[in-house]
Image: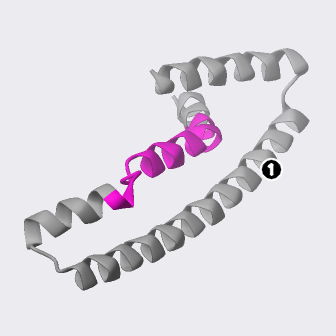
Amino acid sequence: MATKTIITLILTLLLSPIVVSAQKAAQPADSKAAVSRMAKELGLSDTQRSQVETILNNEKKKVDAVFNEEKMKLQAIQEETRANLQAVLTPAQMQKLDNKMRQKSGAGKK
C-alpha cells in the first residue's frame, strides 16, 4: 500500500507540467475576442475598450510569467527527483518507471 502511494506521488510530481499546460490552455487564447465580448455585453466606449484591452494584455503577461516561473520550479523538482530515483533504482526498475510514466502521460493527453 505504501509503495503504491509513493509511486503515485512520484508520478504526480513527474507529470505535473501536464497540469500546468492544461491550466494555461484553459486561459482565453485571444484577448481581442474577450474584449469584443465585453464591449458588446457591457456597451464599452472606444476609450474603455482600449483601456480594457491594455488591462487584459498586462494581466496575461503577468499570468504567463507566473506560469513560467512555476513551470521552471516544477522542472527542477522533477530533475532532482529523477536523479534521486536513479541513485536508488536499478536500470531495469528505472526503465519500468519510465515506461509507466509514458503510459500515464499518454493517457493524460487524450
Residue 30, percent across and down?
Answer: 39, 54
The verdict on residue 19 being magenta is yes
In the figure, residue 97 lies in which quadrant?
top right
Q: Is residue 85 left or right of residue 100?
A: right
Q: In which quarter of the image is the C terminus?
A: top left
Say above or below: 24 vs 46. above
Residue type at tag 1: Glu
- Magenta segment's dominant SS is helix
Kindly identify the residue that appears in the image at 26 percent across and 85 percent down: 47
**Residue of label 1:** 80
Residue 90, percent across and down?
Answer: 88, 22
Kindly identify the residue that appears in the image at 52 percent across and 73 percent down: 62
The segment highlighted magenta reads: 9-32
Q: Residues within 10 Å of mark 1 (few under 14, many from 20)?
A: few
Residue 64, percent across and down?
Answer: 54, 63
Kindly identify the residue that appears in the image at 65 percent across and 21 percent down: 102
- Looking at this rendering, what residue extends furthest in the front direction? 46
* Viewer-side residue, 6 vs 11: 11
Q: Is residue 103 left or right of residue 99?
A: left
* Viewer-side residue, 69 vs 57: 57
